[in-house]
Amino acid sequence: MAEEDRKSLERMKESEMRYLEDFVDDFDLSQAIQSLNDKEKRIIYLRFVEGKKDTVIAKELGVTSQAVSKVRRRILKKLSERLKQDDGV
């Protein structure tokens, strides 16, 4: 793959991560995802859209897999709490 093509693909993925909520059909989940910052969206995108393991994500982000796991759990808790709020629970 040419260097220019690789960079274009990376930009596309970054763009998709930034607007991840636009790719979700569920309105409440989309709103919850919108509340995440770009780093959180990137982790969610890499894990659940691309299916990458924490160790692979960690290498991409330059952190430990434990850090990715901790942040991912925090993100999922944040999303869960936001969805409970939206449901009035």
Image: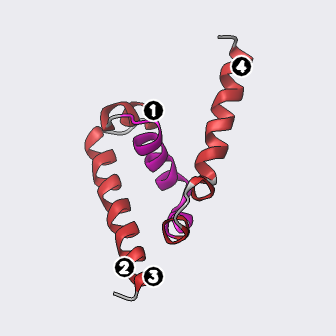
**What distance separates the C-alpha of mark 1 from that of mark 4?**
19 Å
Q: Residue at x 68, y 36 (%)?
A: 12
> Residue 5's mark?
4
Prevailing SS of the magenta stretch = helix
Check disc 1 and report the residue beneath it: 60
Q: Residue furthest top?
A: 1
Q: Amino acid at mark 1?
A: Glu
Q: Which residue is mark 2?
A: 84
Q: Amino acid at mark 3?
A: Asp
Magenta span: 32-52
**Marks 4/2: CA distance?**
42 Å
Numbered badge on residue 86: 3
Q: Secondary structure at mark 2?
A: helix
Q: CA distance from mark 4 to mark 3?
A: 41 Å
Q: Say which amino acid is labelled 4.
A: Asp
What residue is drawn where x is 33% and y is 87%?
Answer: 89
Label 4 SS? helix
Residue 15 colored in magenta in the image = no
Give yes or no for contact between labels 1 and 2 (Cβ–Cβ under 8 Å): no
